[in-house]
Structures are given as structure tokens and as C-alpha cells.
Image (spheres, helix red, strand yellow):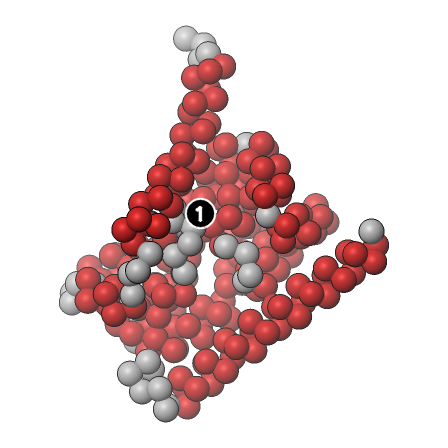
Amino acid sequence: MKMSKATFTILKSLPLFTVLLFVVLFMTFGKNITFDQLLNYTPENKLLAAIVIIVMFGLKSLTVFFPIMVLMLVSGAIFSTFTAIIINIIGVIVCISVPYFIGRFSGGEMAEKLINRNKKLRLLSDYQQKNRFFFSYFVRVLGFLPCDIVSLYIGSVKIPYIIYISGSILGFLPGLISATIIGYSITNPKSPAFIISCAFTVILSVSSFLVYTFIIKRKNKKT
């Protein structure tokens, strides 16, 4: 039986409406959730705790505004550094895969809407046409764009999943490792590990801002 155009349009829009619903729910009930609350809600059993944290990463991907770093910190505070890094990598893969497939399912119209509504994404959109792997890596290293919006966009322009995931994880890795170590040493803020990780995070943020400023100036000159 052939699907009608109206039904197909509704089905394509359904995932996006789901994201919007989760955003509204988060802004209404969850925007004041803290690191300590998440830590208290996490089960004491390590295996269950790992599963819960990965599920949290998946739910985070639908809220857009909840900071992914908080979940990395929680993981770092509960597990050993190596284990927490593995859990955070799995969590990030889940987190950036859900909106990617929503964007891929919803099609190119979403890409156009996202570019029109987000100036920063519009400035960088040219780069994805030149080198898809580098673009997937680059937007994660910069870190100033909401990771879920980026995932929706990349899915909608149909960058191959393997290229997208490998580039994204590579871009996330420096900040992910740093956040994990901060979470692990958060009870001892005077420790060298905590201080170095915080300093590295600040340097990464400042570097991202400088690179973004350079891109804007370069684009303005071309224009």
C-alpha cells in the first residue's frame, strides 16, 4: 500500500517533534539538575551505574541544552579514570548518534532550516563540502555549537556515519579526557590532576574561540 504524501511528511516530522518535546520537558523540569543530584541518582552497583549514565547520554541528546560535560564529570567521579573514559566514549557515541539519525531521516529540509537559524553553523557549512571527516572533527574541537544541533545538521546532509563518528570522537577526545580527570579528582581541587585538567579545558575553550574568530575574519574578507 502506497503511503500518502501527508502521512510521509508527518512521519518525517515526528522525530523532530520528539526532540522539541524533550526540550520543553527539560526547560520545564530539568534545567536546574546539578552534578550532585545526578551523582546521587546513579546506582551504587557499577554495572548499573554505567548503564544509567549511558542512558543519560542518550536522553541528553534529545534535550539540546543540557551540557554533556556534566555527564562526563559524573562518570569520572564514579569510576576509575580509564573505565570512565571508555564509558564516556560509549556515551558520546550514543549521544551524537540519536540526533544524527533523526536528522538523516528528516532529510535536507532540516539542514536548510538549521543553517538559516544558526549563524555559526552557516559560517562553517562550507567546510563540510570540502572535507567531511575534517568537518566532523573540527566542529567538535571548536565546541561552541550545541553538539545535538551539529549532529542533526550532519545527519541531514547525509555525511556517512562512519566518517561522522570517527571524526566526532577524535574531536571530542581532548575535552572528554580532561572532563573525566576533573570528575575523578573533583573531591581534591588542589591536586595537580584537577588543576592541569581545568587549565587544559580553559586553554581549549580559548583556542576554540580564537579559531572561530579567525574563521569569521577570513570569511568576511572573502565576502
Residue 148 position, x and y percent, is 47, 50
Residue 3 or residue 60, whichever sits in front: 60
Residue 65 or residue 154, whichever sits in front: 65
Q: Name the residue under label 1.
A: 97
Residue 113 or residue 194, whichever sits in front: 113
Which quadrant of the figure contains the N terminus? Answer: top left
Q: What residue type is labelled 1?
A: Ser
Compared with 57, 77 (above or below) is: below
Residue 117 or residue 94, whichever sits in front: 117
Query: Does residue 94 appear anywhere in the picture?
Result: no
Compared with 143, 210 (above or below) is: below
Q: Which residue is drawn at 50% across and 63% down?
A: 172
Residue 184 position, x and y percent, is 33, 78
For numbered disc 1, what is the local secondary structure? helix
Q: Residue at x 43, y 86 (%)?
A: 195
Q: Is residue 214 left or right of residue 167?
A: right
Q: Which residue is drawn at 57% across and 64% down?
A: 141
Q: Residue at x 36, y 65 (%)?
A: 70
Q: Is residue 47 left or right of residue 196?
A: left
- Kindly give the residue lying farthest to the front in the view shown: 28
Q: In this view, does 118 lie to the left or right of 169?
A: right
Q: Is residue 170 left or right of residue 121?
A: left
Residue 3 position, x and y percent, is 44, 13
